[in-house]
Image: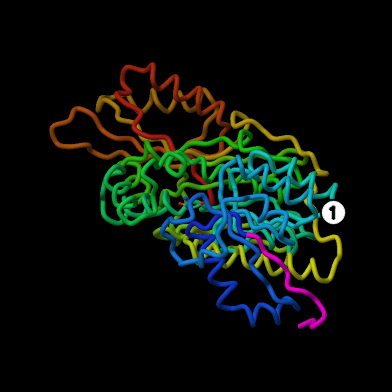
Amino acid sequence: MRADYRPIRIGLLGAGSVGSQVFKLIQNDSEELAHRVGAKLEISGVLVRSLDADRDYDIPKSFLTTDAESVILGSDIVVELIGGIQPALDYIRTALESGSDVVTANKTLLANHGPEIFELAERVGAQVYYEASVAGAIPIIRPLRESLAGDKVTRIMGIVNGTTNFILDQMESTGASFEDSLQKAQQLGYAEADPTADVGGFDAAAKAAILSSLAFHTEVHIDDVYTEGIEKITQLDIESAKEADYTVKLLAVCERVGKDSIAARVHPTLIPVSHPLASVRGAFNAVFVESEASGELMFYGAGAGGIETASAVLGDVVMASKRHLGGGSGLNESSHAKLEIMPIDDIVTRYQISLEVKDQSGVLAVIASMFADLDISVETLEQSTIDSDSDNVMLTIITHETSERSLQKLIEKLNSQDQVVDIRGQIRVEGV
Ligand code: HSE
């Protein structure tokens, strides 16, 4: 440790489940952290909304304040853990403008205002670290930003939302409905009282925007990410997937498409049970990265949780502290590639379509001709009975690759066909 250097002042904005654990780790491991950094880390203040709120870790009152400016201006490194857009954006701007480096876990802010934050950081010679913004404890930002900096990432498929992974896993392993599985996730504290951000895919979309921006050196905003949630997934989807040796996951898919384009999308997806992502159960997260030179890599672990996410935050605090001490420009974000972001209509993928059709002669021929007319090739077709009283049967069809545009035309045609009683599900298929 450098004996001649004053302690590095760390200002915490927020003392919720992650912030209070960051405080605890910095206090409890102070000696070891001082050796790793080369100077002591000292908490300069903790910004809270209420001085008397209950916290996961009891932070001494002398650290707490409701005065944001005193924490921001009195710190060398500002750790933003309050989430949301405002006032977090203003706090980060003030911190960067005053010469501090910033550590943040704020995916919503980065997915909406990343370019402006990175541009300001570059202008003032500061750094923004954000390992905890995607997939909690899992190191994925640093591997993409540093370890793979010399490689060319072609595709990322991530299970980056633990709540939805838990719900889908629960539906598959217990046969429970979506509603009952969501209720269980809420009882266990995975899902919020208002679960929209998780089940609607928006939390995963923010993470997809961050991962795509980083991997493809292109500004990707959350609105560029095509987003579908898991609210419409039924037991029928899960069961028909299982019968065909697939499992249903909410995936964030970020990919290069051709030479100069990329796409980012979040939607329920069938993946083969043999794919490494299929083994990610419960509320765990995993990110599967494909790169030209390194091939396939998978990063797995806890995607949420106070202490787990605090680990990622603290890694960034240590890196920022070392830079503070040793100098150097650090790594700035680069969006030099400026690749075109493809709309979902142009994306090519495979689909599983579940149709309830009349059990009459000629129906298969009619349906087959609709696929043929749109040049959509069928890979597998399974027919199953619904129940012994029904005049209808189920057809589960998996297609070869086709464009979203053709698929939507097919769905329109199927909907207008009398022998098709109901389109019971349509899910994209990846990882084959
Ligand atoms: N709500 C998220 C999840 C964790 O369920 O994974 C925070 O991003």
Answer above or below: position of 129 versus 412: below
Q: Residue at x 40, y 42 (%)?
A: 195
Q: Amino acid at mark 1?
A: Gly
Can you tell me whether the CB of the residue at mark 1 lies under 8 Å from the nearest atom of ligand 1? no
Q: Nearer the viewer, residue 44 or 287?
A: 44
Q: Residue at x 29, y 42 (%)?
A: 179
Q: Position of residue 23 (x, y in %)?
A: 56, 67
Give the crowd class for mark 1: few <14, some 14-19, many >=20 residues within 10 Å: some
SS at badge 1: loop
Q: How is the image coloured?
A: rainbow
Q: Is residue 288 visible?
A: no
Q: Is residue 198 visible?
A: yes
**Quarter that holds the N terminus:** bottom right
Is 10 one of the magenta-colored residues? yes
Answer above or below: position of 55 versus 259: below
Q: Quadrant of residue 355?
A: top left
Q: Position of residue 273 (x, y in %)?
A: 43, 57
Q: Position of residue 84 (x, y in %)?
A: 56, 43
Q: Is residue 209 left or right of residue 75?
A: left
Q: Which residue is mark 1?
A: 125
Q: Is residue 268 left or right of residue 342?
A: left
Secondary structure, magenta segment, majority class: loop
Answer above or below: position of 98 versus 10: above
Is 60 one of the magenta-colored residues? no
Q: Position of residue 164 (x, y in %)?
A: 42, 49
Q: Which residues are magenta?
A: 1-11
Q: Nearer the viewer, residue 190 or 407?
A: 190
